[in-house]
Image: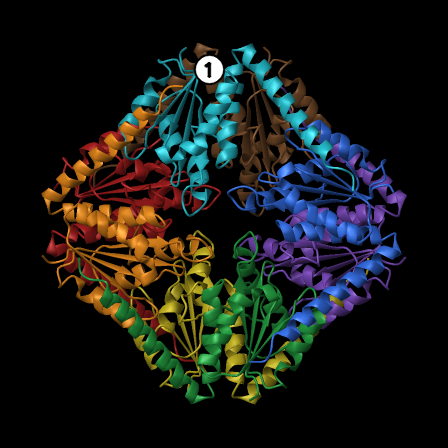
Chain colours: A cyan, B brown, C blue, D purple, E red, F yellow, G green, H orange
Amino acid sequence: MKPQVLIIMGSESDLPVVEETGRILTEFGIPFEMTVASAHRTPDRVRKLATEAEKRGAEVIIAAAGAAAHLAGAVAAHTLLPVIGIPLSSSPLQGFDSLLSTVQMPPGVPVATVAVGRAGAKNAAILAAQIIGRKDGEIVKRLAAYRKKMALDVAKKAGSLKKR
Amino acid sequence: MKPQVLIIMGSESDLPVVEETGRILTEFGIPFEMTVASAHRTPDRVRKLATEAEKRGAEVIIAAAGAAAHLAGAVAAHTLLPVIGIPLSSSPLQGFDSLLSTVQMPPGVPVATVAVGRAGAKNAAILAAQIIGRKDGEIVKRLAAYRKKMALDVAKKAGSLKKR
Amino acid sequence: MKPQVLIIMGSESDLPVVEETGRILTEFGIPFEMTVASAHRTPDRVRKLATEAEKRGAEVIIAAAGAAAHLAGAVAAHTLLPVIGIPLSSSPLQGFDSLLSTVQMPPGVPVATVAVGRAGAKNAAILAAQIIGRKDGEIVKRLAAYRKKMALDVAKKAGSLKKR
Amino acid sequence: MKPQVLIIMGSESDLPVVEETGRILTEFGIPFEMTVASAHRTPDRVRKLATEAEKRGAEVIIAAAGAAAHLAGAVAAHTLLPVIGIPLSSSPLQGFDSLLSTVQMPPGVPVATVAVGRAGAKNAAILAAQIIGRKDGEIVKRLAAYRKKMALDVAKKAGSLKKR
Amino acid sequence: MKPQVLIIMGSESDLPVVEETGRILTEFGIPFEMTVASAHRTPDRVRKLATEAEKRGAEVIIAAAGAAAHLAGAVAAHTLLPVIGIPLSSSPLQGFDSLLSTVQMPPGVPVATVAVGRAGAKNAAILAAQIIGRKDGEIVKRLAAYRKKMALDVAKKAGSLKKR
Amino acid sequence: MKPQVLIIMGSESDLPVVEETGRILTEFGIPFEMTVASAHRTPDRVRKLATEAEKRGAEVIIAAAGAAAHLAGAVAAHTLLPVIGIPLSSSPLQGFDSLLSTVQMPPGVPVATVAVGRAGAKNAAILAAQIIGRKDGEIVKRLAAYRKKMALDVAKKAGSLKKR
Amino acid sequence: MKPQVLIIMGSESDLPVVEETGRILTEFGIPFEMTVASAHRTPDRVRKLATEAEKRGAEVIIAAAGAAAHLAGAVAAHTLLPVIGIPLSSSPLQGFDSLLSTVQMPPGVPVATVAVGRAGAKNAAILAAQIIGRKDGEIVKRLAAYRKKMALDVAKKAGSLKKR
Amino acid sequence: MKPQVLIIMGSESDLPVVEETGRILTEFGIPFEMTVASAHRTPDRVRKLATEAEKRGAEVIIAAAGAAAHLAGAVAAHTLLPVIGIPLSSSPLQGFDSLLSTVQMPPGVPVATVAVGRAGAKNAAILAAQIIGRKDGEIVKRLAAYRKKMALDVAKKAGSLKKR
């Protein structure tokens, strides 16, 4: 099946965080492709990936990077697909740098930014599912089931805390 | 025509920034509805707007708020539609508070966050168009035209700066 | 005995910090109830807890959450009881996000915010006791004893540091 | 009538912000006293005000200060009444300094901190009313009416924004 | 004469700051070219400018941008020339975003970052002169004269402040 | 009379803030000398001023600078006199840069740092008086009088705020 | 011998950092006294210590505290001696809170603030020695020797790094 | 062979990070000298190193320091060579202090600042090579080869991530 989501991470060392994104997309039954490309070390590779993504069937691109995290912005500059950016906390400045570099895009080229690190890696997958859900009602049903399960999990944990 | 985008702002005083969002949606020919609701002062109104948005035909919800900007998150908690958050710089802390309150969502409930203030207000509209574009090729054509025009504008301005 | 304080934490993983709150309330002989509810994953549960708290006998609600910490604000939107917010440092941004998300409430719906993390967890209990003390003189006596004991502890430690 | 709330500001120049607090207390029919005292320039005056407040009939103390805003903490150290702190943005660091100085209290002596500046000045009054409401049901009714009016105001403003 | 320095700004509205760079290069007799190109709105234009700069005779490239300031990094990804980045304070976050986006480059692709705003605009020119000075002793003489003049200016101003 | 305090500012444009320092020293009857020297533009001048200050009769040196405010540290490196640093908020980063550059000195070479801007300019003078007071009891008397007057001013302003 | 420096730490847990201060004072042969007192838990103890310090022979007071670090400011409010503040990084906010709480004192009551944590603990001792040196030439000689030794240490370490 | 790059670190403890700089210069075949000198503990040594560097054959100076990182600025004040600054994250404030102290130089004396910590240590070497490349085409070839290898590494890692 054709990948509907293209996930790009800036460095192979980002994999332990970014594979959360893949794990959740798999849970939703959304086919995806995961690769490494750096906005600075391999700009042409980024441009090629971004430019061809739509033709190759992607509906959404997810880009994860740390420090001066330009990856999502560089991708967004070369596609009209929605681009989701995950800021990673891999530098000594703990994600303040990657967050600001990802979210503060100039007018005209948005990046849909999610939370720094692992929480963002999960939410990027869910946001992608919500976008794809706009044309695939089946995905919306899975989102509804996922959310219901989350709520039940919270209720169950709440139950296990006794009144003291 | 049925509104495809629901825009909610936390306070009427946010209108001068948020009307940029409306202006660009109009440029793309995307019908929208714009209203005021506060996550804290009118939580039931927010819940009702969020819960009914999909049934009323919305494809995307855009929420703009300042300070402890919970509006986008509160909306996202009540819908499976993609929710775009615009952090506004209306408190003395200049948007650092609204940015962190909007983007740092916990796993399970993403908010697609754009830049603080006016740049974000514009980009929220474009991101909404990119999402709607996933099922409406006509919008993608307009996005392509918009981007081409932006590039031409830059080139024109570049031309007007002489070699010195 | 009816719980006078309702403690809500955003995630079960917050328990190691939040149980400090319970420990001190126990020390003051204030009955409390502790549960889990997420402003984003279980908004209806939060609303129900907040809406019913007063009728169920609560005098104060304490809410603890990390990241874009909306929990205390979401509770405050649904009750007229005083709401105390404990920002937790559970994201890579170390509590700057949860602090700003908790304290920067818009006019009309206050959250009584205490310090980030463990210090705040303790102080939330003491602040709750101070509020309850407004109608229960017995609690004020215990607060006075607690404070006297704190002062004695400091003096004792000071004594154990010799002049060098 | 005996003042139920004691409002202390660190400097007379804080009055334009802090009088919002008084305005709202008046709206709730809560008698208050407003004065100036500086934790650093007049520590004995602060101690005297804090120590005597309870005996003089106060239920809550509100303290507003900017920069290294120690006022609320200094008051809290000398009373068992609930103390509400309003951080003001009067230094070049725009309130980051006063917020952290007010909220980050050590275990044992809480300050119920509200938002920086004008929003906080309003919310301090409402929080005080919520605390006093714990023993005065009449105040709770006024809080309910105030909140209802706020919600109606939002709805009215929402109505004035047309679908476009 | 062939331009030795290529100055790129992200938006025409940056000109009032960036023209300081040009003014000082002129003072040093270094020919330069100034243009507009946006990493996000005109990525291909940026790539073309960066890729061809060396062949066209440039020794140094200076890039100035605000917000998520990717311009200098995007240029650096496409050239082996030294690239100087000027972060501008054009967003509500006052330059913290552009500074971190410009300086926090990943290993392999440096950007020589100077101060935020006007001070940086001047220093970019001087740094460019220092680099060009490595192969043009005449420029080093002018730098020496410039620095001597600066020192004299300080001394003169110091003289005009009387002992009191 | 020989100047007991040497005040150095990094730029003539800092005078409107730094003259507060002079004004208060004058009030205390402490003779001082005020000059301009830049750690970066005139390092030799700074070294000379710092090295000779003690011999010329100074008891304390005060250094005021903005941005990467190295002036106080550079002075401290060349003298064994106490050095007081005033961080100024003259860059777009509003004093966060000058504060950190002034206060975060490495072990071995302290700078006695005071508040950013005008408050710091005043306090530098008072701190200098406190240091000089260690060998001149007359100055301590004036400090006591100054503090008493401050307290009276606060009390007077407090009196002018009526109970409402 | 009478202690010339009074060192106060806010909590016994600060001892591992603050004992650096004592170690260096010992090195300079300056007698000191070290104790624990909390601005919030034992305000009267702080006031007593501060008020009596001068009479008991102290020339300088050093105060070390974390979080909303009011200790140095509270001490300074009760003495005309120079007060040195050491901000500690004991809260989740890593010292940003204690630094701002210590340094941003209002006009009239300075705190001579040194670096956050261990570097500051050392420098507080050296700054105290510089102040005492103003009336004790012997201490200045030891400061000169200390500084010479520091310089030699650096040179020695430099020597051990070979040209490569 | 004469060293073309002079590397100065503020403290021997910075060596584990700064040796990355040396490792990469070695890879480029650029001879360098590495030493220790502190802007504050050995200002004369810094001045001597900076003043003589050009005569001794250096083309570029690299300075690495943490906290109030004045080293690069102090060097820049004494040379007309390009100076590259590496901010280190050695204080509790994690590099925010060293970054601002290094990059925010006043007009007239630039420091070419690279990223905080290890990434910056590597990039300082590459930036030095780019500057030296301006008069040594051989170095440019090595830079081209280095960059090509980086790109291949990324592509290889990308290949090892399978479509899932």
State the residue at coordinates (64%, 28%): C41
For this rendering, which residue is in front, F58 or C71? Answer: C71
From the viewer's perspective, tell me whether residue B138 is left or right of residue D128: left
Residue A63 image position (x, y, % from top left): 41, 29
Which quarter of the figure has residue D72?
Answer: bottom right
Residue A4 image position (x, y, % from top left): 43, 16
From the viewer's perspective, tell me whether residue F1 is left or right of residue B112: left
Disc 1 sits on a residue from what chain?
B
Answer few, some or many: residues within 10 Å of disc 1's Cα (few below 14, many 20 plus, some between 14 and 19): many
For this rendering, which residue is in front, G122 or B131? Answer: G122
State the residue at coordinates (51%, 44%): C93
From the viewer's perspective, tell me whether residue F50 is left or right of residue B5: left
For this rendering, which residue is in front, F114 or C16? Answer: C16
Q: Is residue G152 above or below residue C103?
A: below
Residue beneath disc 1: B133
State the residue at coordinates (58%, 10%): B1
